[in-house]
Image (cartoon, grey):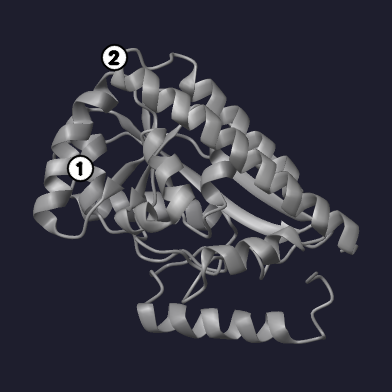
Amino acid sequence: MPRLQTSWRVLSIIGHLGTATTIALYIRASTRLGARPRWTPAVVRWWNRRLCTILGIRIQVQGRLETGCLLIGNHVSWLDIPVVGALGEVGFLAKSDIRAWHLVGWLAETVETRFIERGAHRTQALCDALIPEIQAGLRLMIFPEGTTSTGVSVLRFHPRLFALAQNAGVSVQPVALGYRSDGDRVPDSIAPFIGDDTFVAHLLRVVRHPGLVAEVRFLPALTTEPTEPRHRLADRTRRAIAEALGMNAPEPMSAWSAKAARDAMHADAASPEVAHVG
């Protein structure tokens, strides 16, 4: 990518974060006064859409975002959040580690991203708090893999959080996420945020990317029953996503296999023979 365009993207991101900080300060001040702005979700959606534009991410969508569903997605990158967030007013459940991402964590907390702590007891407490909100219309997205993948497989879905849908009496909508370089059909090697990568280092690689395409497939909603074992519901959802991505994965990839795939992808990304990497 030309250096001038890279510089423009970096400066635009800094300006966009400045805009977000100003908005977040206003939201926090209004909330403390007991009048959280009603336009907050719409502004968050605009901010996500603008960020994707700055990063040069072209979003391709299949299907439609349903109402009254718990959204379940495979997890490739932190980019998943602005990409899906650009398509609708969606809340996210994120790992508590993100709180430590300085400005990013503070902004996420301001717009009421829900954070999940490690431990079964804390997970149950979070579920108990979220169920009334979901029943009241909160459109929430979770990533039950519990980590990010290379995008060439879908890892095992941890079933515990599927109780959110069952206990709230709502359906589950699988969301299949994939990334590729513009003009290429294979999964992109830059988009995945994996291993010991840092947010800033990954962001800079995305900024230099010549053309990233995010493919979002909103799949038909799956009905849930309180008596269905959660692991079975998790497996049904995972299979639907894997098939939509053309993987047809009969069994979840093990942690060891996932690590091997990550190492292989990083090796490919470092090779000068990979022509589509910017």
Residue occupying the point 61% across, 79% down? 265
Is 250 placed above or below 66 here? below
Res. 217 visible in picture? no
Judge left or right: residue 244 versus residue 236: right
Residue occupying the point 39% across, 35% down? 110
Which image quarter: residue 107? top left
> How many numbered discs sit on the rendered protein?
2
* In the foreground, 210 or 60: 210
| Residue 60, horizontal then vertical, whole percent | 70, 42
Judge left or right: residue 28 versus residue 166: right
Residue occupying the point 66% across, 70% down? 189
Which residue is identified by label 2? 34
Report helix, strand or loop for mark 1: helix
Check the picture and name the quadrant holding the C terminus. bottom right
Q: Amino acid at mark 2?
A: Gly
Judge left or right: residue 174 versus residue 138: right
Judge left or right: residue 230 versus residue 254: left
Which image quarter: residue 19? top right
Mark 2 or 1, nearer chain start: 2
Q: Nearer the viewer, mark 2 or mark 1?
A: 2
Report helix, strand or loop for mark 2: loop
| Residue 212, horizontal then vertical, whole percent | 74, 55
* In the foreground, 70 or 197: 197
* In the foreground, 37 or 144: 37
Which residue is identified by label 1? 163
Is 149 placed above or below 109 here? below
Which image quarter: residue 164? top left
